[in-house]
Image (tube, grey):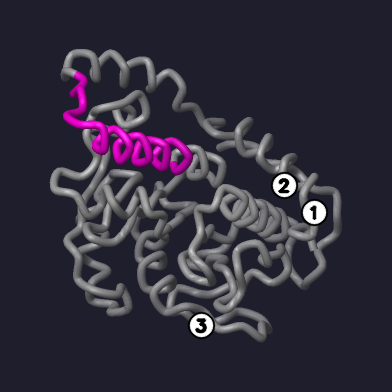
Amino acid sequence: MATQLKSTSQPKIDCSADEWQARLDLAAAYRIFAHHGWCESIYNHITVRVPGEDNAFLINPYGLLWEEVTASNLIKIDGDGNKVGDSPYPVNLAGFTQHSVFHKHLPHAHAIVHTHTPDTMAVCATEGGLQPTNFYSCFFVGNIGYHDFEGITVRAEEGERLVKNAGNHQILMLKNHGPVVMGRTLPEMFFLYYMFQRACEIQVKTASLGAPIMVPPEVIAVHQRDRDLQLTDDFGKLDFEAWTRKIDTIDPSWRN
C-alpha cells in the first residue's frame, strides 16, 4: 500500500503512532476537501479505518466545519457506532450507518468520502448517471455502482442494499443524493474523488451547451487500458502530498 506522509510529531492524544498517523492523514484530507469547497456546512463525512484494529474507524466530529477538523478532535468509533475514548462531540448517525457497512464488508473501503457537491448531486439525480463525454468520465465507465434513493441513510437495514449495490466498485452513486467514493488508501480515495468531481463538473457544463459528444466504446477501452497502468499502490500519493503542502501554507492547525 501507499506510504503516506510521515510525521515525526508525538501523538497529542492517547493513541498508537499508527493511529496518530492515520489521524494526521485524515485531518489533512478534511482540510483539502474544505479548501476545494467539497463540503457542506457541518455535514457529510470522510472516514478511515484505524490501522491494526478490527472494525474501528475515524470520523469527523458532528458540529464542526471541515476546516475545523484536527488530528486530535477526530472521533474513533467501533462497528456499532460507540465512541472509543473521550470526545465532547456527537457522531452523525447517517455517517455511521453508511460508512460502517462499507468499512466492515468491502476490502477496498479503507478510506471513504461522501459529499453533497452541487455537480456530483446533479449527476446523481440525472437519468443514466455519469456519461462517457469527457476525459475524466471515461476513467469510470463500467466501474460505478448505483443505489436507488431511500431517504436519509439512518436505517441499519439499508446497509445490506448499499453493500450489494456497491459490489466491487469504488464509486457508488446514490441516486437523487450524492456519491460515495472508496479507496484502498486515503490518497487513492482522494484522487479518485478529485477525478470524479471533475467528471461531474464537466458533464454539467457540457449539458448546458447542448448535445454532448459521446466517446465510443473502443476508445473508452483504450483509455481504461492505459488507466490501469497508473493504478499502482501509490496511486494518488503525489497528489495528496502536494495538496497537503498547500493547506500547510494556509493553516497548519489540522496537525493539532
Q: Which secondary structure class fits the magenta region best?
A: helix
Q: Is residue 247 left or right of residue 143?
A: right
Q: Circle 1 sits on which residue?
A: 252
Q: Residues within 10 Å of mark 3 (few under 14, many from 20)?
A: few
What amino acid is labelled 1 in the image?
Pro
**Residue 82: which numbered mark, if any?**
3
Which element carries disc 2, helix, strand or loop? helix
What amino acid is labelled 2 in the image?
Ile
Q: Which residue is drawn at 37% across and 15% down?
A: 226
Query: In the rendered structure, are the residues bearing label 2 and label 1 in contact, judged by CB atoms less than 8 Å apart?
Result: yes
Which element carries disc 1, helix, strand or loop? helix
Which element carries disc 3, helix, strand or loop? loop
Q: Identify the residue at the far front of this view.
A: 209
Q: What stretch is highlighted in magenta?
A: 193-215
Q: How crowded is mark 1: few (under 14 residues within 10 Å), some or many (20 or more)?
A: some
Q: Position of residue 250 (x, y in %)?
A: 77, 49
Q: Which residue is drawn at 53% across and 58% down?
A: 48
**Residue 247: which numbered mark, if any?**
2
In the image, residue 246 above or below residue 166: above
Q: Nearer the viewer, residue 68 or 170?
A: 68
Q: Where is residue 106 in the image (x, y as percent from the top left)?
A: 35, 54
